[in-house]
Image (spheres, rainbow, N blue to C red):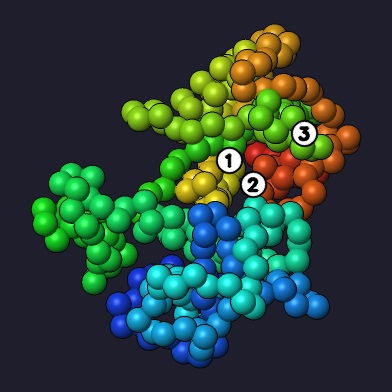
Amino acid sequence: MIQDIYPHRLDNQFRADAAPMPDDLVFIFRGRDLAVRETQNGMTLPRASSFEASDLRYLFSLDDSSCWMYTGEEEFHKPCVFRPVRELRRSQMMESHLLFASFTAMQLALWYRDNRYCGTCGSLTGPGKLERSIVCPSCGRTIYPRVIPAVIVGVTNGDYLLHTKYERSRHIPFYALVAGFTEIGETFEECVAREVMEETGLKVKNIRYYKSQPWGVVDDILAGFYCDVDGDPTVHLDTTELCEGVWIHRNDIVGQPDDASLTHHMMMTFRDGKEPKAAR
């Protein structure tokens, strides 16, 4: 999965005393597009030596180096080109640890961008000094990074796993699993049952947790669950959400083009018969 970058390591601990070193990586975003340098060996990121320290904001460390976000007013171009972060994943031209760092950096960059003004009093905000936060100097409101809980669901029927395809992504030539956001006042398990029923008309039982994944491209923390169909396995699609829902035998599961997502990992885990089994 995208966060599995060993032997590299990403440490998201806030460091108020960090100072940029020449070889530190710098993330420059234009919306959801990231500035990258294209080389013969793939894509990499600009270095701190090209910037004034006052134009950089500390994000996290990657291995033994600090990573920074460019905050300067000057438009930055050469020798970089801007590429959508999702495209960087599909291109497979960026090393996996840099891709995970890019997902995480974009989540933080968009959070900083979207909270320039206080939602309580409308005053201009500023970065916190002692922790990763945004603080309003007028009313004292403190804003922390947003993390949205969501579920990925492997619905099983014996040796079959339910594969879905979203209406908005019908052009994508591979399947996904049932997924959805957790509502206020709802447990993960309740979310699993509701999302499966809403999207496919299926009742489920034996809901069991598997693994989680940070997915910074949309601010998510994904919780993966398996569950068994309860009763009639006939799929009744919510066609506003899904364009396809099919049962595929574990021997015929193909998965997705790369191993970045929890969805793909859950598909392959079921294919190999290693999914958590229901208690007897």
**Which callout, 3 or 2, points at the residue further toward the start of the chain?**
3
Q: Residue at x 66, y 49 (%)?
A: 261
Could you say which is closer to the camera, residue 20 or residue 200? Answer: 20
Could you say which is closer to the camera, residue 48 or residue 249? Answer: 48
Check the picture and name the quadrant holding the C terminus: top right
Seen in the picture, residue 104 relative to 54 is either above or below; the reply is above
How far apart marks 2 and 1 lie (CA) works out to 7 Å
Seen in the picture, residue 264 relative to 110 is either above or below; the reply is above
The amino acid type of the residue labelled 1 equals: Gly
Circle 1 crowding by C-alpha within 10 Å: few under 14, some 14–19, many from 20? many
Q: Foreground mark, 3 or 1?
A: 3
- In the picture of the structure, the residue carrying the numbered disc 3 is 171
Could you say which is closer to the camera, residue 269 or residue 108? Answer: 108
- In the picture of the structure, the residue carrying the numbered disc 2 is 262
- Residue 11 in percent (x, y) is at 47, 71
The amino acid type of the residue labelled 3 equals: His
Q: Residue at x 66, y 30 (%)?
A: 168
Asked if disc 2 and disc 1 are in contact, CB closer than 8 Å, the reply is yes
